[in-house]
């Protein structure tokens, strides 16, 4: 691989984790950071950085080409609600959007990745340098799920795979084999809050990849904040897809879950 790696950085801790892992492997990181999303501290972890607004595709491509970058990853989230207010698409981005009949996650990301690859920039899976972040199979917590909770996990799994097939979201909240909330553009934490408000205590949260998940981007992700949100609404189980969910701060997640009586399981 080229000793230079491009990073298209969103929010959260993933861009920093990726940059540190790349540096440990002797790679120089050239980062595109998004105004209002990316942590400014990323500047201290990369060789060079360019700040852009969402949709400035021409500036992104130019930065990578100027620096001889031919391999890149997308890491971190973009607040989806900002897609209606914070986007400043340039002419090249508008041309891509004009060819699409919808702007749902996978189709949009694949289209923009395709534009980069036309320029000789290969997009790699976001976890290719940090496979240890992928969720492990089995129960992670001291408490094991009850038979009723596992019935909700299986029910939620069918629902979350169906909404994933439709490219709607990656999370559902269920209770007693009834759907309390489905993830939309508001994201996982808001979905848990909505579902917990309706189901009260003992709701089950299921998060999984889409059936045709593109492992290069938009993989399901959970972190300590996920467990904090569940604790606040009295949710009882978090089930994530093993091998296809990114986990940030697993030890802290498990410790908080154990203190809160929450089960975390990785399901295949």
Image: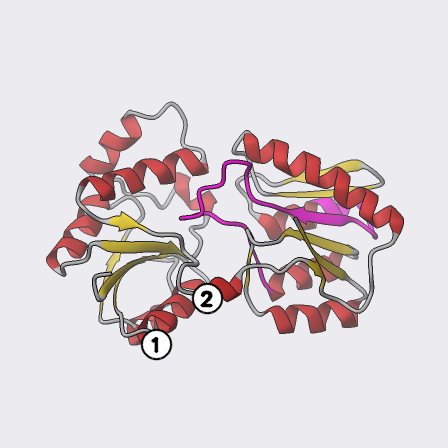
Please state the total of marks drawn on the protein image. Answer: 2
On the image, which quarter does residue 70 sit in?
bottom left
Apparent side of residue 196 relative to residue 23 in the rendered image (left or right): right
Determine whether, in the image, residue 24 is placed left or right of residue 80. Answer: left
Q: Position of residue 150 (x, y in %)?
A: 81, 48
Mark 1 and mark 2 residues within 8 Å of each other at the beta carbon: no
Q: Is residue 40 visible?
A: yes
Q: Would residue 198 be seen by someone viewing this image from the given angle?
A: no
* SS at circle 2: loop
> Between 61 and 122, which is closer to the camera in this rendering?
122
Residue at (23% x, 30% y) in the render: 95
Q: Is residue 131 left or right of residue 170?
A: left
Quarter residue 164 falls in: top right
What is the span of residues highlighted in magenta in the rendered image?
Answer: 195-223
Q: Residue at x 57, y 70 (%)?
A: 249
Q: Nearer the viewer, mark 1 or mark 2?
A: 1
Question: Is residue 254 positioned above or below 190 on the image?
Answer: below
Q: Is residue 145 above or below residue 19?
A: above
Whole-angstrom CA distance, mark 1 to mark 2, is 17 Å
What residue is disc 1 on?
24
As drawn, the label of residue 13 is 2
Between 43 and 134, the residue placed more toward the observer is: 134
């Amino acid at each position: 691989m080229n000793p230079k790696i491009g990073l298209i950085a969103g929010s959260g801790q993933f861009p920093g984790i990726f940059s540190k892992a790349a540096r440990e492997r002797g790679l120089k990181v050239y980062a595109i950071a998004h105004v209002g999303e990316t942590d400014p501290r990323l500047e201290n972890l990369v060789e060079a950085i360019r700040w852009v607004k969402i949709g400035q595709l021409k500036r992104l491509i130019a930065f990578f080409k100027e620096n001889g970058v031919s391999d890149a990853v997308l890491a971190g989230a973009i607040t989806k609600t900002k897609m209606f207010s914070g986007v400043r698409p340039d002419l090249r981005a508008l041309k891509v959007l004009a060819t699409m009949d919808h702007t749902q996650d996978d189709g949009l990301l694949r289209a923009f990745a395709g534009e980069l690859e036309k320029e000789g920039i290969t997009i790699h899976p976001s976890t290719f340098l940090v496979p240890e972040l992928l969720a492990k199979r089995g129960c992670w917590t001291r408490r094991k799920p009850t038979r009723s909770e596992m019935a909700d996990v299986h029910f939620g799994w069918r629902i979350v795979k169906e909404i994933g097939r439709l490219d709607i979201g990656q999370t559902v909240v269920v209770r007693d084999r009834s759907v309390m909330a489905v993830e939309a553009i508001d994201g996982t934490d808001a979905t848990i809050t909505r579902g917990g408000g309706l189901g009260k205590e003992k709701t089950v949260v299921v998060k999984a990849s889409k059936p045709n998940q593109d492992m290069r981007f938009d993989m399901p992700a959970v972190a300590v904040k996920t467990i904090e949100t569940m604790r606040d609404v009295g949710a009882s189980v978090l089930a994530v897809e093993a091998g296809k969910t990114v986990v940030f701060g697993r030890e802290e997640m498990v410790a908080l879950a154990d203190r809160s009586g929450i089960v975390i399981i990785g399901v295949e």
